[in-house]
Amino acid sequence: HANLQLVLETFSHTQQASKYSQSNGAETALTLPPAVWGYNDMVKDDVYDPVQAKLMLQKAGVKNLAMKVWAMPVSRPYMPNARRAAELIQADFAQVGVSVEIISYEWGEYLKKARDKDRDGAVILGGTSDNGDPDNLLSYFFSCSSVGGSNFSNWCYQPVETLLQQARALSDQTARSKLYEEAQVLIKEQAPIAAIDHSMVVMPMSKKISGYILDPLGSHRFDGVDIAE
């Protein structure tokens, strides 16, 4: 629906991602972290522009828009304080005439309800890649087969699905990278999500400690760790 598409695009001009994330990560509207191969640096973030956002809503014929934003009840590596982020989103959206109600649930219930295709509201959620392959993030969040599961936007777009399937069938990294770059262009255009950032996990430790390596899956391994006397 053209008007719905315009409203979705409006949200990216309304949010101030730097305020929401509370992390040291890279602010981006893209679906892959800049460090992952296949990242398309030609796809640019939308500029925060509430005036433009208001005009876009008027063009879409939308008035008195109200929506719900779900805030996670837990702290995650990619979003330390979802409640605070939701409050900031609420304030920014109010500037363009969009009323936001913040809701939350117990963590297990939150995840269960977030997968519901008939869910009412936008959820704050993210993920951590466990192998560094672009497919591990793009298919996880945007493939048609993930709808009702990890595709929390419940978005199935065949042109993107085709690119993901083609890339998955190849072993050549350069060829796969081109397909993923195309997919990112389409995902940005269709705007099934409003990306905030890609977080950087920080682990403070004493200078006496050596041999500790951050685990990409979030666990803590102490084999090989030494503490100087």
Image (cartoon, grey):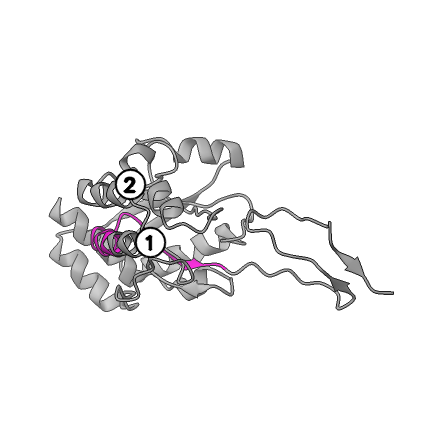
Q: Residue at x 37, y 50 (%)?
A: 134
Answer yes or no: do the residues labelled 1 and 2 have beta carbons within 8 Å?
Answer: no
For badge 2, the amino acid type reads Ala
Q: Is residue 133 visible?
A: yes
Position of residue 197 measured from the top left corner of the image (x, y, whole percent): 42, 59
Residue 186 is left or right of residue 177, and the answer is left
For badge 1, the amino acid type reads Gln
Relative height, residue 80 to residue 135 (above, below): below
Q: Is residue 106 visible?
A: no
Residue 182 is left or right of residue 94, and the answer is left
Q: Nearer the viewer, residue 110 or 191?
A: 191
Viewport quadrant of the C terminus: bottom right
Viewport quadrant of the N terminus: top left
Q: Quadrant of residue 182?
A: bottom left
The residue beneath circle 1 is 173
What segment is highlighted magenta in the picture? 181-199
Residue 205 is left or right of residue 132, and the answer is right
**Number of marks in the image?**
2
Q: Extreme right residue here?
A: 229
Relative height, residue 143 to residue 44 (above, below): above
Q: Residue at x 49, y 55 (%)?
A: 84
Relative height, residue 201 to residue 128 (above, below): below
Q: Is residue 208 magenta?
A: no
Q: Extreme front residue here?
A: 172
The residue beneath circle 2 is 169
Q: Using the numbered discs, state the Cα–Cα distance from disc 1 to disc 2 in whole angstroms.
A: 11 Å
Q: Quadrant of residue 155?
A: top left
- Assess disc 2: are there few (<14), some (14-19) or many (≥20) residues with their C-alpha within 10 Å of its C-alpha: few
Position of residue 96 measured from the top left corner of the image (x, y, whole percent): 27, 60
**Which element carries disc 2, helix, strand or loop?**
loop
Position of residue 56 measured from the top left corner of the image (x, y, whole percent): 17, 60
**Which element carries disc 1, helix, strand or loop?**
helix
